[in-house]
Amino acid sequence: MQQEKTRNIKLVLEYDGSRYAGWQKQAGKERIVTIQGKLEEVLEKMEGSPVEVIGAARTEPGAHAYAQIANFHTATAMSVTEIKQYLNRYLPMDIAVLEACEMPDRFHASYLAKEFVYEYKVATGEVPSVFERKYHYYCFKRPDMERMKKAASYLLGGHDFKAFSDNRKMKKSTVRVMKDISIYGDEKEILFTFTADDFWPHMVRILVGTLLAAGRGELAPEEMEHILAGGDRAAAGETIEARGLFLSEVRY
C-alpha cells in the first residue's frame, strides 16, 4: 500500500530556461522537455512513486528564473537539507534548488501568490557581448530612457491589458494591477523590472517591445493610454525574444 504523502515541501528554484519549453508539462507530449517535467522525474526516483510539482509561475519557453517558487507533497523521511542535496545532485546543471523548507499543508505555490516580479534585460552596447547573448535582447538603436519612463507611467495601476496578450482566445479577465515599473540603464544595458498581481503569457515581452518602440520614437508615450483603452494587440509593440526574461521574485 502506497504511503500517504503528508509533508508539503517548498522549493526556491533558479534555472536557465534556454533549452526548455517553459515551466509546465504538456499533456501527451512527453518528449517536450520542461522544468516541471525534469523536477518530477527526479522526485519520482526519490519518492518511488509519481510526484506532482506545483509552480508559482508558468514561465515561457526560453525564459529564466532567479527565484521560481514550487511545492510538492512527499512521504519521504529525508530532511529538507537532504531533499535539496538530492535534487541538486540529480537535476541538470541548468536547474538548481536554492532553498527547501517544510510548509503547512495549505501552502500552494500558485494559488497563494500575491505579486510577481519579472526582469527583462536589453543590451545596448555598440557590439553585443558574446558571453551575454543568451540572456539579453540586443537593441541596435539606443532608446530614449525618458520617453520609455513616461510611456511606462500610463501602465501603472489597474488596467485591462488585453492589448498586451498574444492569446486572442483568452476567456478569463485580462485586467491586472501593475504595481511598479522600473527602467534603469547604463551605456551597455537597460533593465526593465515589472511588479504586478499577475502576468499573462508573453505580457512582459510585449510590454518591453512597446516601451522600446516608444523609446525609439516609433510611437508617442501618450499613445500607451489609447493602446490600453483600445485593447487591440496590433496597436502594441512586438513580442520580443524570451531570452532576456527572468522571473526574479514571487511574493506571498
Image (spheres, rainbow, N blue to C red):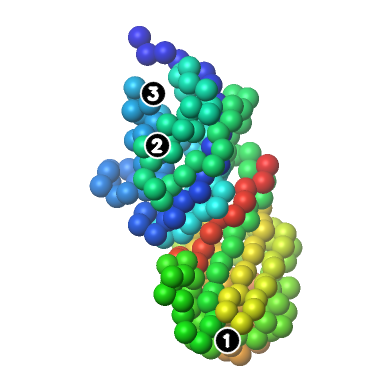
Mark 1–mark 3 contact, CB under 8 Å?
A: no
Mark 3–mark 2 contact, CB under 8 Å?
A: no
| Helix, strand or loop under label 3 | helix
Q: Is residue 133 left or right of residue 219?
A: left
Residue at the image position 70 percent from the left and 77 percent from the top: 149
How far from the left and from the top, in percent, is residue 190? 60, 75
How far from the left and from the top, in percent, is residue 101? 58, 30
Q: Earlier in the sequence, mark 1 or mark 2?
A: 2
Q: Report whether residue 187 is seen.
A: yes
The quadrant of the picture occupied by the C terminus is top right
Q: Earlier in the sequence, mark 1 or mark 3?
A: 3
Judging depth in this view, the residue of 39 and 172 nearest the camera is 39
| Helix, strand or loop under label 1 | loop
Residue matched to label 2: 89
Point out the frontmost of discs 1 and 2: 2
Q: How many marks?
A: 3
Q: Quadrant of residue 91?
A: top left
The amino acid on which the numbered mark 1 sits, given as a three-letter code, is: Arg
The amino acid on which the numbered mark 2 sits, given as a three-letter code, is: Arg
Point out the frontmost of discs 3 and 2: 2
Residue at the image position 64 percent from the left and 78 percent from the top: 186
The quadrant of the picture occupied by the N terminus is top left
Q: Which mark is residue 47?
A: 3
Judging depth in this view, the residue of 195 and 159 nearest the camera is 195
Spatial CA span between label 1 and label 3: 51 Å
Residue at the image position 57 percent from the left and 48 percent from the top: 67
Q: Report whether residue 226 is seen.
A: no
Q: Which mark is residue 142?
A: 1
